Image (cartoon, rainbow, N blue to C red):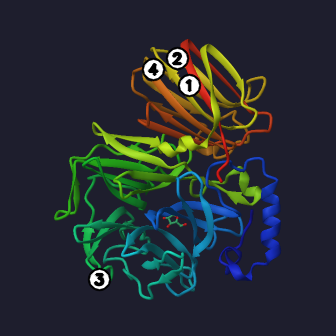
């Protein structure tokens, strides 16, 4: 769609009710709307923001542009949940309304402090020459969901040597104060993560560039998250323009992570780091947003969508979704991502069991959880979203002897983003294979070997593609549950 800048940044109140109604109508006739994934009511959804636990509920926000499936004037849309499965839509919460956020309430995080939820976010402002100005801002949300924006920025300008590409603050309770980390760009166009410290949330001291690599991390880093998981320091971030010689990836921009043995506050660095890795091996994960809840469980949720890529639902007036909620652990220096245990509450009735060398199932509706176990060394394929002829579908191929797996969406349905390839290949451990696969209408999330890897993809099948077909050179067993819609 061709949207002018004026249209994209038009204040919401200048849009007619009719516009939203006609969007809703169009969206209601979509065959790709999701059953249990968070999706925009209308328009575009991108990064998850402000994931937290507050007032006896999980709180979550996402970047929203409600007027169309383009990156327009962004706000934070609010959701809350008591079980991480069923999310209540609480509507637009933080909207652009002042000189520090006039052109978008950009990404950030949340932290419960003294009976309120503190929201840290970036205010995006464009001047008359369309030059960008970024402000790191704060707001309080009370238990009734009322927002009070803090009138002056927490951080009003980038430190010397950095550009206005500075955003996505993550606020972390640290010692008896607060650490704030933010994605940034140097004047030489190098991606960086910067850290700040404050005792009172008002006066922020610049600590410098977070040390976590000797290598260049592209021209910009977005959405950094620093977490303390199982005694280790985990850094999850999105480097843009990262050299393929430094790190191999196929998506337009990767969502990556490193694990450090420790975070040294004095030196402002992570020590003894693992090499940079992709957080997901599939096609569409970006802007993964994490926090540790009050029980010390680290939860993550990702945007399933990528910047600068058109998706087939754009024409239907909506775009993108969020992943299911994943629990992160670090076991033997390795990151594991598992669906949170609450996900089992989506199961409808009993599971259907099967075993053998080959299985064909008609799921009727592409909304299920599939668990597969390949006990021995073997090779095989799994065709999801299969049509009756098994000509179309998303193909997962594995070879546990050589430790390889691939996801091929070249024949999965309506194609898109082909410039970035239609196949993703990755290494898996050379051992018996366990897969847990969540299929939901136009998205699939694959968890490999208890979350050692994940592979996520949007898929846009035709209506007859509801089958699955599994074939291996040795016997395997599996279970399938139909999953309910989110309430
Ligand atoms: C990442 C991002 C963030 C920014 C937000 C704006 O997808 O570009 O850096 O805060 O989206 O919607």
Give residue 400's mark: 4
Front residue of 277/4: it is 277
Q: What separation in Å lies between label 1 and label 4 (alpha carbons)?
A: 10 Å
Locate the C terminus by quadrant. Answer: bottom right
Front residue of 289/51: it is 51
Residue 466 visible in the current orientation: yes
Q: Is residue 10 above or below residue 87?
A: below
- Measured as percent of width and height from the top left, residue 72 is found at 64, 70
Helix, strand or loop under label 2: strand
Locate the N terminus by quadrant. Answer: bottom right
Give residue 397's mark: 1
Q: Earlier in the sequence, mark 3 or mark 1?
A: 3
Q: Are marks 2 and 1 in contact (CB under 8 Å)?
A: yes
- Residue under numbered circle 2: 379
- Measured as percent of width and height from the top left, residue 217 is found at 36, 55
Q: Earlier in the sequence, mark 4 or mark 2?
A: 2
Front residue of 396/111: it is 111
- Measured as percent of width and height from the top left, residue 51 is found at 47, 61
- Residue under numbered circle 3: 203
Figure label count: 4
Helix, strand or loop under label 3: loop
Q: Is residue 422 above or below residue 237?
A: above
Q: Give the residue displayed 43% in from the left and 17% down from the top.
A: 401
Q: What separation in Å lies between label 4 and label 3 (alpha carbons)?
A: 54 Å
Assess disc 2: are there few (<14), some (14-19) or many (≥20) residues with their C-alpha within 10 Å of its C-alpha.
some
């Amino acid at each position: 769609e061709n949207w002018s800048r004026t249209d994209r940044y038009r204040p919401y109140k200048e849009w007619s009710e009719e516009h939203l109604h006609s969007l809703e109508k169009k969206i209601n006739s979509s065959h790709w709307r999701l059953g249990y994934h968070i999706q925009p009511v209308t328009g575009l959804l991108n990064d998850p923001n402000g994931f937290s636990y507050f007032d006896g509920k999980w709180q979550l926000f996402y970047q929203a542009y409600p007027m169309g499936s383009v990156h327009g004037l962004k706000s934070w849309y609010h959701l809350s949940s008591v079980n991480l499965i069923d999310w209540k839509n609480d509507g637009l919460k933080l909207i652009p309304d002042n000189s520090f956020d006039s052109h978008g309430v950009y990404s950030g995080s949340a932290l419960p402090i003294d009976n309120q939820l503190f929201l840290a976010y970036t205010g995006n402002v464009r001047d008359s020459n369309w030059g960008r100005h970024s402000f790191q801002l704060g707001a309080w949300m009370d238990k009734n969901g009322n927002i009070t924006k803090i009138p002056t920025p927490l951080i009003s300008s980038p430190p010397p040597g950095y550009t206005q590409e500075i955003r996505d603050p993550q606020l972390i309770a640290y010692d008896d104060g607060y650490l704030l980390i933010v994605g940034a760009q140097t004047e030489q166009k190098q991606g960086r993560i910067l850290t700040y410290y404050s005792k009172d949330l008002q006066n922020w001291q610049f600590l410098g560039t977070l040390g976590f690599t000797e290598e260049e991390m592209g021209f910009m880093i977005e959405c950094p998250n620093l977490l303390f998981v199982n005694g280790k320091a985990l850094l999850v971030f999105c480097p843009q323009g990262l050299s393929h010689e430094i790190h191999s990836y196929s998506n337009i921009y990767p969502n990556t992570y490193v694990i450090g043995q420790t975070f040294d506050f004095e030196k402002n660095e992570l020590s003894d780091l693992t090499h940079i890795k992709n957080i997901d091996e599939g096609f569409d994960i970006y802007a993964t947003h994490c926090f540790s809840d009050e029980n010390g469980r680290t939860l993550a949720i990702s945007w399933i969508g990528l910047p600068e890529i058109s998706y087939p639902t754009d024409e239907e007036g909506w775009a993108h979704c969020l992943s299911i909620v994943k629990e992160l652990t670090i076991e033997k220096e390795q990151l594991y991502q598992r669906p949170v245990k609450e996900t089992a509450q989506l199961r409808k009735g009993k599971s259907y069991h099967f075993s053998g060398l080959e299985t064909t199932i008609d799921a009727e509706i592409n909304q299920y959880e599939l668990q597969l176990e390949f006990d021995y060394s073997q090779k095989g394929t799994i065709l999801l979203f299969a049509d009756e002829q098994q000509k179309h579908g998303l193909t997962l191929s594995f070879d546990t002897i050589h430790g390889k797996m691939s996801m091929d969406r070249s024949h999965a349905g309506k194609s898109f983003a082909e410039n970035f390839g239609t196949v993703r290949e990755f290494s898996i451990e050379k051992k018996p294979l366990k897969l847990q696969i969540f299929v939901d209408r136009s998205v699939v999330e694959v968890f490999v070997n208890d979350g050692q890897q994940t592979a996520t993809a949007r898929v846009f099948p035709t209506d007859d593609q509801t089958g699955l077909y599994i074939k291996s050179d040795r016997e395997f067993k599996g279970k399938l549950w139909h999953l309910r819609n989110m309430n």
